[in-house]
Image (cartoon, grey):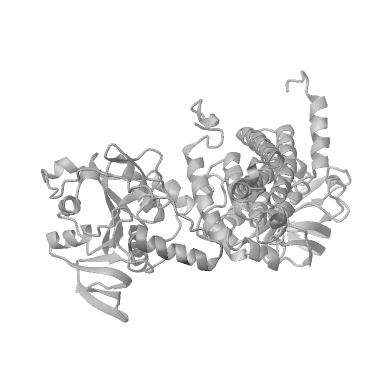
Amino acid sequence: MNILVLIKQVPDTEAKIVVSGGKVQEAGIKWIISPYDEIALEEAIRIKEKTGGTVTAISVGDDLVQQSIRTAYAMGADHGIHIKHDQYQMLDAFAIASAIAKAIEGRDFQVVLAGRQGSDSDNGQVPLILGTLKGWGVVSFAKKVEIDSQKATVHVEAEGGEAIYESTLPVIITANAGLNEPRYPSLKGIMASKKKPIEVINFADLGLGTVSRIEILGFEPPPPRPQGRFIDGADPAAKAKELARALREEIKVI
Amino acid sequence: MHPSLIFDMDLYHPKPEHKELRELVGTLGQDLLEKAARHYDEQENFNEELLRDFGRKYSLFGLTVPLEMGGHGLDATAEVIVHEELSMYDPAFTLSYLAHEVLFVNNLYHSGQDTLRQKYIPPALKGEFLCAMAMSEPQAGTDVLGMKTMAQKRGNLYILNGTKQWITNAECADAFLLYARSGPNRKDISAFVIERRFKGLRIGKKEAKMGMRQSPTCQLILEDCEVPEENLIGRENEALLHMMRNLEIERLALAAMALGIARRSLKEMITYAQQREAFGKKIYEFGQIQHLIAESYARYRASRALVYETALCVNPQERQSLSAAAAKLSATQMAEFVSRSAIQVLGGNGYTRDYPVERLHRDAILLSIGGGTNEAMQKNIMKDLVQLENLDI
């Protein structure tokens, strides 16, 4: 079973995001594999450990994303493909899915695993578009995955219960939280990951031209939160009265 | 910019691997040690499975063992990084890590012949064998050459008799690196690998300790203990050299633990001083609190530089007893001062077990005693200083 995992490199969930000049300032940011993608990667490695085969991690971005591919190696991925694009911030989901579809042409993957969405932009579109481009089925939000040589059985949380989907292969599955607990890499894994080659494909060489359908005009930070206000009053009753007055007369919400 | 980065030389991470190692171990410490540290301290119970996982899952044993033998081919700096990071979260667990990784694995690899290495290093690296070292005795601590445990050759066995004291990990260890007297002269010391299953070995009482309570410390009792002759490490009566050599990296690792304790204590008191108010001000605005925190920070930074500088030159090929003793003396006293200051800054809260600083302080005190007391360090430093020829200090 050969499995492809879509990896997005994102700022650490605790990183402080600074926006200036219409761009996210990347200096000083610690980069990680998007947490849902890490769950997808873990699932792929577990399937490989059970049934054999290979795990390939693929990522689109500038040279920095090789760091996440190396982390994937340290966890247990066998191959890594880096689709290199220095202005990757300006690519939309369609462009990224198109590049992945093109890059894996002629390669034999039965299962594609990805996170349900990136933890930075929360779009959750790339796996769906990739499924459309390749004509493969997509099952989203998996909380349990079983794969045999013919089909995939995917359990998904549903209103008040769970839905169970069966799909022929190849199939694209997106991982929800709770599917598994990703492992920590071992020191051996980290050391070995540094020596493994990464296959680099230039985005420009894929012959897609200008493929983005959405133009990103710029990034802006959210407006700073206004300071909180304390309601003064001699006792609770007076404070309540003052609060009601402020809500009615100043903020006009009641 | 951090001062250590100015000259394109990072004292704390001389190689890129050191940075990755610190990151991995820091994550493991935060995720796997932090939450449970108080529980294991209060229960006086050892998280043995996690220590075995450090071999089985995370391959964190054998840092100084060459790649051919399944280790990582790293150095003393790597040991310092791991001990420093883990001690931020749980010094007691770290002490048990030290007993296995430094006192047994590093020691046996650098002192043992190939047959013994082949037999014991691979299972120790995988966590299948959890290990320990036995040197002290009830009547021989600092005066280590006063040890009374005797090893006598009988046929193809050595027969050992005596009692060993303060043996970290003894409760659960599968194998011990043990020193015993093997001849009439004071320096006739030999070392052996003794498996738990060997006839005549008994684990004695578990000590009830002030700190380091997760880490189990017991006596070892040898009553006509039968040890196959091939388990003699190196040659008979020649263990003193590798005992002294291993003490250097042990002292460095203990000093690194002191750094971890101090760093954590500093983080706790700096955070607290910015939140807690008194007399209408944050308490860090008071000179007395500034004194405690600033003194702690300055001493921590000085010891940290000394420990990492020493780590650059500690290796199996050369002796660095003077620097290793100075690093341990400096860092352990510093950690006692800094953790005590943290309790003072946190006031009543610092004295409760709801905050980690009282535990860190109890743990810190062991570091001034184990691996050679601070008084032994002072004695060693003086001995080395008077032997320096041109006083190039």
Is A136 on the left-hand or right-hand side of B82?
left
> Is residue A31 in sight in this rendering?
yes
Where residue B239 appears, as percent x and y from the top left, is 75, 45
A68 and A198: which one is in front?
A: A68
A191 and B194: which one is in front?
A: A191
Is A77 on the left-hand or right-hand side of A169?
right
Does A51 appear above or below B245?
below
Where residue A30 appears, as percent x and y from the top left, is 41, 45
Is B293 on the left-hand or right-hand side of A229?
right
- Farthest residue to the top: give it: B390
Where residue B181 appears, as percent x and y from the top left, is 83, 50
Does A216 appear above or below B35?
above
Where residue B10 appears, as percent x and y from the top left, is 52, 32
Does B290 appear above or below B232?
above
Residue drawn at x 51%, y 41% is B18
> Is residue B113 in sight in this rendering?
no
A160 and B373: which one is in front?
A: A160
- Farthest residue to the bottom: give it: A160
